[in-house]
Amino acid sequence: MSNLLFQLIINGLIVGTLYGVVAMCFVLIYKSTQVVNFAQGEFLLIGAWTCWWLVTSMQLPFWLAFPMTFAFMMVFGIVLQMVVLRPLIGEPVISVIMVTIGLSIFFQAVMKSIFGVWPQPFPEIFPMKSVDVFGLAVQPAYLMSLVVSLVIMVAFAWFFKYSRMGLAMRATAFNQQVAQSLGISVKNVFAMAWAISAMVSALAGVVVGMVNGVSSALSFFGIKVFPAVIVGGLDSIIGAIIGGLIIGVLENVAEYVDGQWLHLGNLYTVAPFYVLVIILMIKPYGLFGTKTIERV
Amino acid sequence: MSVENTPVLEVRDVSLGFGGVRALSEVSFEVKRGELFSIIGPNGAGKTSMLNCISGRYKPTSGRVYLDGRDVTGLTPNIRATLGMGRTFQNLALFGHMSVLDNIMVGRHHLLNNNALTGGLYWLSGARKEELSHRRKVEDIIDFLEIAHIRKAVAGTLPYGLRKRVELARAMAVEPKIILLDEPMAGMNLEEKEDMARYIVDLNEEWGMTVVMIEHDMGVVMDISQRVMVLEFGRKIAEGLPAEVMENERVKVAYLGIDDDEPAEAGSAA
């Protein structure tokens, strides 16, 4: 019985790192461009479908399809920022939010019309048989996702701490006017933020798609990211990761509690949002967020 | 040569309006290479508006701005920065959570060639060598401003005077042809002001940097500037050597409110 709980916690941590990665992408966009991106989940969806299409319809090997998906999402992110979001700079926050919600609905519909409404399994890239880790059954794809997530997190940390563009992005997030006076192109930084966010989210989308199949359920990740981001604080990258882990574990523990004692059903899905409400009541800026940021 | 003679900065008939308010009316001036030029004027005279027109934050309603003979009127602030314009801000604008060194390194952004991809191949792409040479220049600036002991400190935790110095260091890191200082001594005590004045003079004389400065402290301005321009209600009312400007009747009126017809007004002096 406690073995089941332990198993669920491990699952929660693994899914949590993925939430963390997507939350990080969300925070990246919020921090550098002050846009609350409700279409974050659709990045996963589009990325996963693109990769799926390349692998199944185009019959490309995965090692080729994967970088191509990456490249496509980079271009996609940049174009989206340039065409849709750049004209909205300086418009009221609520307008920008409505646009991202609109984008979310639009992309979901487009994906459904192209690829249909049924979940499609990825061709087997990793063996689906569970491997034994400390006496627990873990799917290899999940293990890979854990590794990939950790690599992304380290890469993010390195990028922001040491790279020239990372430094420029931090500077822009802090004060656009000053950043400009130092020769940083705010336009490029914005485009870069969307590109990175789209790319990394797509990566998460592909990983989840391999385990659960590709379907519109992927965009639900974008909604799950909200509790994670609110828990961590809207503008903290570290907070996003920790928030993701908390939400991942919480979901699974809620599932366990529900299954053992409460029998309410579906607590798995709802629990993160209870936490979201509670956090907003007692610590409205999240665990790591800046106190002065605007809540929307 | 003509390069020596062209002014580093030329402002020609710049006007700026916000709705019905005219912040600047047809202001023209030139700043020569290697000059220390000050813009003074009572509060609301349009000094910071002028600086913002030069640096590109505001677009003048009419008139042109030339940097090194090149028309930069339509260019964005970041492009002007890469062309050789550095500035500091009236209200401290350091990246508070970054270290002093990182703050200064941001100033070198446009001089670094490696992008995120080649930077990833740190050891192969020359990014390491590049960074080392940049660090050397940054260290020169740090030595000059005597902020070596705080280079690792988080900028937001430093006292005011030091933060102003770090901001100057960051503007210098851009390697500009001209540096714009918006009230570099505002809110400082006498000792800090003297220090800052010395740095500005050394920057001008030893580093050969052309400096445009806005400052309220008349003592300092008249002491260190080579030429002074006076603005009042968005108009240029005087320009010349400090001594000449001090003797100018219109300047006296603007600053002290002394007028033949009206009794003296208090409170408008800087």
Image (spheres, rainbow, N blue to C red):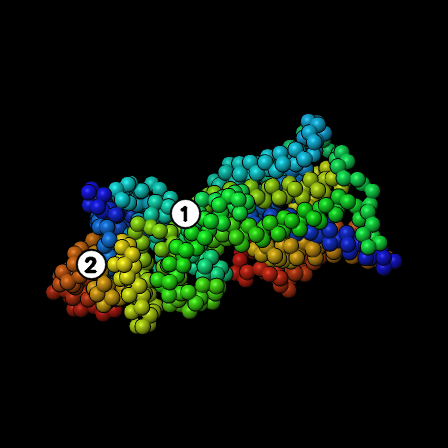
Report the residue at 19% width, 45% height from top.
B5
- Which SS class for mark 2? loop
Report the residue at 75% width, 43% height from top.
A141
Task: Name the side, left or right, on which A85 lies relative to A54.
Answer: left
Quadrant for the C terminus of chain B in the image: bottom left
Whole-percent x, y for residue A101 in the image: 60, 43
Whole-percent x, y for residue A32 in the image: 52, 50
Report the residue at 67% width, 44% height from top.
A204
**Disc 1 sits on a residue from what chain?**
B
B75 relative to A52, above or below: below
Whole-percent x, y for residue B199 in the image: 31, 63
Mark number, residue B226: 2
**Is residue B203 something one can see in this rendering?**
yes
Mark number, residue B111: 1
Q: Residue furthest top?
A: A58
**Disc 2 sits on a residue from what chain?**
B
Task: Name the side, left or right, on which A288 lies relative to B56.
Answer: right
